[in-house]
Amino acid sequence: MFGLSKKELAILKKLSTPEKIQDFLDRLPINHEKNGDTCLSPRQVLREKKAHCIEGVMLVATALWLHGEESCQFQSDGGSAV
């Protein structure tokens, strides 16, 4: 489904509440980008088991989307979220 493996989809489907999502993120090590800048996709975050801020946001948006939540928008220039 949506290019995700069964294992990836199963992980995201378990993230069915904001609390479960936050707990999952809290357990992920920070991606310190030791080999240069990264922007890991949600799929790569699940594979590499690490994320920095925007990578975590994209993972959260994907999990929420799979559970029928509306998409979210944000600005990366310091403006307020829409």
Image: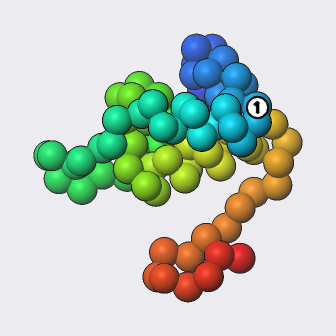
One can see residue 9 in this view = no
Residue situated furthest left in the rendering: 35
One can see residue 29 in this view = yes
Q: Which residue is drawn at the image coordinates 34% and 35% (left, top)?
A: 29
Q: Quadrant of the N terminus?
A: top right
User: Residue 24 occupies which quadrant of the picture?
Assistant: top right
- Residue 10 in the image, given as x and y percentages of width and height: 66, 17
Amino acid type at image mark 1: Ser
45 versus 38 height, above or below:
above
Q: Quadrant of the C terminus?
A: bottom right
76 versus 9 height, above or below:
below
User: Residue 75 occupies which quadrant of the picture?
Assistant: bottom right
8 versus 17 height, above or below:
above
How would you rate the neighbour count of disc 1 (Cα within 10 Å): few for under 14, some for 14-19, many for 20 or more? some
Q: Is residue 27 left or right of residue 6?
A: left
Q: Which residue is drawn at the image coordinates 47% and 82% (left, top)?
A: 77
Q: Is residue 74 left or right of residue 30?
A: right
Secondary structure found at label 1? loop
Reading the image, the residue beneath label 1 is 16
